[in-house]
Structures are given as structure tokens and as C-alpha cells.
Amino acid sequence: MALTARQKATLHELTTRGVLSAEQEGAVIAALEDTGVPPRVADRIAEIAAYLGGGLVLGGAALVLGVSWEDLTRPAKVAVLGGATAALIVAAVVVAGSVSAVRTVSHRRRRVVSTLFSLAAVTAAFTAGTAASSHEFVVGATTGLVAAAAAYVLVTTALGYLTLAAAAILAVIAWITELAPDSALPGGAALFALGVIGMFLSVVDVLRPAQLALAVGAATALFGAQQLLAGHAPVAYALTGCLALVCFVTYFGMRSTVLLVAGVVATTIVVPEVVWDLTDGAVGGGVLLLVAGAVLLATSLGSTWMRRTR
């Protein structure tokens, strides 16, 4: 049961006066609309049609470009990709009801709108990369990051966050590849920093869903640290150990199983690596397994103590 225009205007007036924030306004509207009657069959059909339509637009553009890529000029390629992007954005706005209703779209339509905007961010990245005459990867990845960030701000969902995280990782890789192609240190350090920043933003409730953002941030940081094993092993060990320490310390302020798991995984990885390096590879695989098991057991006991302490 949708709210009337007058009811929405009243809520928006409260936001203008500072009584509610924009996020709170959207949450109130979504909660009130979700208390209405169950979705009709027609609503379900419209939702399915939106998903299928978005997928077909993206697949159709990919098929056209795949078959005729060599024969098409650059303006034609940009036109196809740009047209697909515009179609996805228009479809998202139509599903939401209007441009002004995008941020306050009901929960039932939020997933569809987020999916269409996420697909539009992908096609926008390819459009920009194709239009660029040089540095295509950097231009495309940066455009995709901007588009994914805009989509996430407009409609905050798990899919929107995953699209944003993937775009941020690709943008970092693109820029590091462009600026420092011959060294793994800047790339690994940048990915580690990106992951830690993502974890921090999730802890302060900027990125949502918080648990998903924590998990992706920890995985990104761990991946970046481990990229430095070849040629910069001490730095890799230090960063991985710091990640484990940050996870365990942060757990005292934020009760999250994700933090415990991330800390245990990082510790279980880094300790056998350090043992192998210090012994110059003299330790056999069986001993390393014993070390990893002992570390895992110790960290598990420690995490259990931490949970009981809280």
C-alpha cells in the first residue's frame, strides 16, 4: 500500500526541518509501505520482467559488440554501450516511479532498482573505456567507480555495495598498474589500505550492510598483503599480522563474528609463513601443518575467551 503524495511531502518536510535525516526518511517510507497488503501477482511479474529486461539489454549489447566488434567504428561502439547504459538507468527510474522517488523507493522495488543501477555502472565503465583513445583501463575503471558510488548512494543495498567494492578494487589496480607497473609493493599496499579503509567505514556505519562490508574489506586487505610475498615477504608478514591485530582489537569495541574469523584466518596464514621463512624452508609440510593447527587452536581459544569476556 503506497503512501500518498501528501504523506510523503509531510515526511520530507520533517527532513527539511532537520527532524529526520534523508536516510531516516527513506527507512520510514519503506517500513510504512511494507506494512501494506502483500505484493500482487502483477507486482511479481513486473519485478521479474525488470530483472529479465536488464539482463537482456546487457546481454544484447554484449552480443552485438561481440559479433561486430571489428566492423564497428569507435563512435558506433560507444553508441551501443551508451544506449544500453541509458536504457538501464531509465528502466531503474521507471521502476522506482520517478527520479525523486529513487532514494525513497519501497523495499519491494529497491532490489530491482539497485540491480539495474549496478548493471548501468558496468556498462558505463565499458562505455568510457571504449570512448577513451588512451589509458582505457584507467578511464573505464574510474568511471565505473564513480557510477557505482552514485548507484550505492541512491539505493543502498548489498548488491550495490558489492558493485562498489569491485569497482574500487579495479580502479586501484588500474591506477597502480598505470603509475607503477614494475613493482608489486604499491599495488599490494594500496589494496591493503583500501581494505582497511573499507573496514573502518563499515565500523562507523558509513558502508552498509556492515557485516558484508567488514568481510569484503578484510578479504581485500588480506589479498593485498599476500600479494607482497614475492619480493617483499617481510612487508607481507607485517601487514598480515597488523590485519589480525586490528581485527582482534576492533572486536572489543564491535561484537562481530566476521572480525574474529578474519583475525583467525590472518593469524593462521602468517605464522606458518614466518616459520617457513625463518627456517629457510627446512621445516617440512607436516610440521607446518602442526604449526598452523596449533595457531588455529590458540586463536580459537583466544577468541572464545574474548567472547566470554564480552
Image: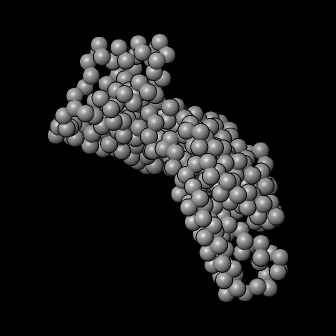
Please indicate whether residue 66 sits to the left or right of residue 204 in the image: left
Residue 99 placed where, x, y %? 39, 22
- Is residue 126 positioned above or below 18 on the image? below
Going by the image, does 129 lie left or right of 243? Answer: left
Q: Position of residue 154 (x, y in %)?
A: 46, 30
Question: In terms of depth relative to the viewer, which is nearer, 310 or 209?
Answer: 310
Figure check: 24 above or below 268: above
Residue at horizontal 63 percent and vertical 43 percent from the top? 200
Query: Which residue does the image show at 34% across and 26% down from the upper left?
Result: 29
Give 144 or 214, whichever is nearer the viewer: 214
As drawn, 74 above or below 7 = below
The residue depicted at 70 percent of the width and 48 percent of the height is: 193
Q: Quadrant of the N terminus?
A: top left
In the image, what residue occupies the spot 64% across and 55% down? 247
> In which quadrant of the rendered view does residue 238 lie?
bottom right
Task: Return the residue found at the far left.
Answer: 41
Q: Please tell me which residue lies in front, 117 or 262.
A: 262
Q: Quadrant of the C terminus?
A: bottom right
State left or right for residue 21 relative to residue 146: left
Measured along the vertical axis of the image, is residue 58 above or below residue 268? Answer: above
The picture quadrant where one finds residue 274 is bottom right
Q: Is there any visible trace of residue 194 in the rendered image?
A: yes
Percent coordinates x, y for residue 41 in the rendering: 16, 40
**Residue located farthest toward the front when viewing the structure as drawn:** 309
